[in-house]
């Protein structure tokens, strides 16, 4: 019986026992006596398995007595048996000056290369950090049996290793720790991977540039394959970095707003009526009635403002039943929403947004440089350019720039995605920024609650923000006057019965306010130019993808 | 035409113009010339309205020329016309030493009391802070016309006030600013409330103790009435405080975890299969197929651990299609979820939880004392008691305590809500804490992915945490071994095809890990003993409530 077989047998036994015991005879749990008996049987089985393992190893190796007996093998499934409290090393803290120390650590086996029956090299990985390990028969450090066993452990398995730190003879370029390596003394399997992986981490981590070489002989891991096996893909340095950065964007967003007196709110995702028009909304069976998934927290965050919260934000899922199969649409994404009352002019709110984005862009550069560089190594992108005070253009200026560049477009036409991108290019050339704000959109292309411009009612007090020419935020001053809001509902054909609680909020008076919603995944995608929003969503949802 | 009527007329006119212009003739926007013409008409109308307002005021008052003309009235709807940048005061910063300063501020009229045609008292409110304002004909400070106009403004309207700060003759007990008051010089309406409110803020803010007096003559505002008119209810000091505290809990939760190397993740709420068993799950029409709403981020956060994120958390909505109409159930609530890999024992994770809760409880006390006291004034509660290191009991100890107190309960029975509460009472008496952790639940009452206890397979490595005797967290060590997990699926009758991507995550090896999910609204409710979870959800959802 191999170590793995034994372990399986143990698990099976445990399962059966668990099952017997829990359901017991006629559904009742076993008596203490019966439990004790089971416990004894268990201990006996464990001892037996242990002996068998040793014998099997010795026999299999057929190399005489095993000097490494007990120093390798598969540990029983960790059921939290004991707390020795023995320190387990974070490998990023290992370096040459610590040579001579004996350490214990848990890591994945990223690769193993047996040079002979007497020598095997390992790369161990914790998160995205790697270190080289050596297992050798020199000085009886390990037996041939141990080397055989260890070199056969499937990659991605998680192991517990005891080793001595030694100074590396020369820089180890293949590992993130390059000045030290580890002489392995003990190696046990904590959690074993299946031998066949959907793809190798090496293939999944190859730089785009290598892939494009004509004589490239390795297999490219397509995005769909990655997403189908997302958990494995997340283990790549790039996968890890992208979601560290995503977490960072949320942290920076909130930190900025908390410091400016914003309150975090949570608004319902299940709503009684398709509040923002009937299109693109998912319907739910809600007990004996029908309900819908919120397409944004828009109306509720405005209600919080009417409830005197003054400045609010929310981070939460947003649902769109849009059958768009593009690089930048998903049916579920994370909205970073904010809304605030202002005193005189909605540009006060744009000022807050401006400062906020600059603080996010700066924070990412400062706090996540390692992660950004990691992504760049695999998928090169130009550093995100932004100004200390963001560029603001009026929609009309944008139209003029497009026309000047030969694009035919009407004054009040909504720009197509392509035109937006082209304008982004023109802006970048002229103003050297990948981020800008486009203000004063035509009223006709905005939702019913948008405040018209006071000077020219063809326009509105509304704005979109762009990163690398793609929209990442949409917002506006909202109509806070109940009567005017009702008028606008009529114009837009909005069924007022559907949004009565929203309209009621303004009947008890609300301050002038404005806000906007940011698409988290778009910000992450565009900051690094990832090219597809699915790369910046951990488990993306689109019309064709519901799994994993 | 009253000022209000004029304003309405202006709005109507603007709407019509907006509409005309936007849709224009044959759907095209108007020419520049036509726009200019409209603009002129608009200015003319505005001038006309202004004159009419003055005349009307003078005539209506019939008190001769109005010395306050132009110092009161209704402002045009704020469409962000100009930015004077003139400072607007935060009333919490007003105090007696600042007497003599002239300030400008925006506030709601909380109450107005006209003592005569020559004197009117106001209470102005910003958020939950209030200050007294006085309008008087003394020294020609205001005209009778102005006093009449201002005293007739519906309460809850938002006004812009210019006033002089004066030292209060005696403490003003009815306001939060008690040492200073304001001599009003100008008062204009920014946003007008309807005269009839669903309930008065005064009624909604009355302490429970007053309500319970036998001769109480005011109307009690029932919870359902509050929730039906949630926006108004949020304006009460208690309503405001509760959600400030809710925001604080999220902030403290995240802050603690960020500092300990956790990554924030966002997992999908739309899922392909009813992953945690088919019961209590909402189904969605998803294009041409059916999908479901996630009952927790459980499986996905475990997948993030298998993807080597080591320590993750998520704050997001959780959906339960449970027809439970109790004080502590909702169909949608906010889950504070965390999951982490551990080295030796799942108690490492409980240690993190322990420290985290202590940090939240302490943080609330330190940072939100004002809010807590505010809630307490209306709805008295005993201070939340907790220990610097939280109490941990085994489930079996809990059962023993219950039995000792005369409760009949089997060793492996799940406790009823009532029994949990009773145990909470016993624990409080014995250990003087409102918070404790109950470890080692019977395996049979926990989900399929729960790791059995290594010593006694009737139990499991799982825990619930309690506040004031009610469960606020459920968690466990999860099974990280793919084969054992499959066995447990079989035992529980879980359809493995439904959770294939989850099972696959363990086939490529995952570290031992544990975690838990906290109900945000429960924590807020129980910290303050609010008695009903709907009080701590801004827009609660239950089987009978989908609005507002």
Image (tube, coloured by chain):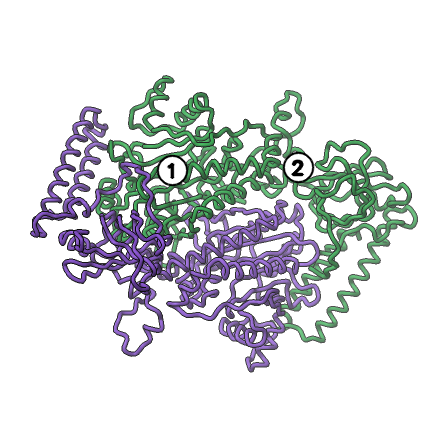
Chain colours: A purple, B green
In this rendering, the answer to whether B471 lies above or below B405 is below
What is the quadrant of residue B8 in the picture? bottom right
Taking the spot 37% from the left edge, 28% from the top edge, the residue there is B393
* A494 to the left or right of B340: right
In front: B315, or B70?
A: B315
What is the quadrant of residue A112 in the picture? bottom left
The residue indicated by pointer 2 is: B201
The residue indicated by pointer 1 is: B350
Taking the spot 47% from the left edge, 55% from the top edge, the residue there is A248
Name the chain letter of the residue that bears numbered label 1.
B
Residue A160 visible in image: yes
* A162 to the left or right of A434: left
Secondary structure under the numbered disc 2 in the rendered image: helix
Percent of width and height locating residue B353: 42, 39
Secondary structure under the numbered disc 1 in the rendered image: helix
In front: A191, or A305?
A: A191
For marks 1 and 2, give the CA distance.
Answer: 44 Å
What mark, if any, has residue A174 been given in the picture? Answer: none
Taking the spot 31% from the left edge, 56% from the top edge, the residue there is A125
Quarter in which the C terminus of chain A is drawn: bottom left
């Amino acid at each position: 019986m191999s170590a793995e077989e034994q372990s399986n047998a143990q698990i099976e036994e445990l399962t059966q026992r668990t099952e017997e015991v829990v359901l017991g005879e006629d559904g009742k749990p076993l008596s203490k006596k019966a439990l004790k008996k089971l416990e004894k049987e268990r201990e006996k089985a464990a001892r037996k398995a242990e002996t068998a393992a040793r014998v099997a190893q010795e026999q299999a190796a057929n190399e005489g007595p095993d000097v490494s007996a007990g120093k390798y093998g598969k540990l029983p499934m960790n059921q939290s048996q004991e707390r020795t409290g023995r320190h387990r090393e974070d490998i990023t803290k290992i370096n040459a000056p610590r040579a001579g120390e004996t350490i214990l650590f848990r890591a994945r086996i990223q690769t193993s290369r047996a040079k002979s029956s007497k020598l095997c090299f390992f790369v161990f990985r914790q998160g995205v950090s790697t270190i080289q390990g050596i297992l050798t028969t020199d000085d009886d450090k390990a037996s041939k049996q141990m080397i055989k066993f260890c070199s056969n452990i499937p990659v991605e398995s998680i192991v517990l290793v005891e080793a001595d730190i030694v100074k590396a003879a020369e820089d180890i370029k293949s590992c993130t720790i390059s000045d030290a390596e580890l002489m392995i003394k003990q190696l046990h399997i904590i959690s074993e991977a299946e031998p066949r992986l959907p793809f190798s981490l090496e293939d999944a981590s190859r730089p785009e540039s290598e892939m494009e070489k004509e004589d490239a002989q390795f297999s490219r891991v397509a995005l769909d394959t990655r997403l189908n096996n997302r958990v494995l893909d997340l283990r790549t340095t790039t996968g890890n970095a992208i979601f560290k950065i995503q977490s960072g964007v949320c942290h920076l967003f909130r930190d900025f707003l908390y410091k400016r007196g914003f309150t975090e709110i949570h608004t319902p995702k299940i709503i009684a009526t398709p509040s923002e028009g009937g299109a693109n909304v998912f319907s739910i069976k809600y007990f004996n009635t029908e309900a819908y998934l919120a397409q944004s927290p828009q109306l509720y965050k405005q209600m919080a403002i009417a409830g005197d919260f003054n400045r609010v934000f929310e981070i939460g899922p947003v649902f769109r039943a849009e059958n768009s199969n593009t690089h930048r649409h998903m049916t579920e994404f994370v909205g970073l929403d904010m809304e605030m009352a202002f005193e005189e002019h909605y540009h006060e709110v744009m000022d807050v947004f401006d400062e906020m984005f600059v603080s996010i862009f700066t924070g990412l550069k400062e706090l996540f440089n390692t992660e950004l560089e990691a992504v760049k190594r695999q998928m090169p992108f130009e550093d995100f350019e932004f100004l200390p005070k963001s560029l603001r253009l009026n929609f009309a200026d944008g139209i003029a720039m497009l026309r000047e560049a030969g694009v035919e477009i009407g004054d009040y036409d909504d720009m197509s995605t392509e035109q937006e991108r082209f304008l982004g290019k023109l802006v970048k050339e002229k103003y050297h920024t990948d981020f800008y704000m486009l203000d004063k959109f035509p009223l006709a292309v905005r939702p019913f609650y948008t405040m018209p411009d006071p000077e020219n009612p063809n326009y509105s007090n509304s704005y979109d923000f762009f990163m690398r020419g793609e929209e990442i935020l949409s917002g506006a001053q909202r109509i806070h006057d109940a009567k005017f809001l009702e008028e606008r509902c009529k114009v837009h054909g909005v069924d007022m019965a559907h949004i009565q609680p929203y309209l009621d909020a303004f009947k008890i008076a609300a301050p002038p306010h404005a806000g906007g919603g940011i698409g988290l995944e778009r910000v992450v995608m565009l900051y690094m130019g990832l090219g597809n929003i699915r790369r910046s969503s951990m488990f993306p949802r689109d019309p064709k993808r519901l799994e994993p």
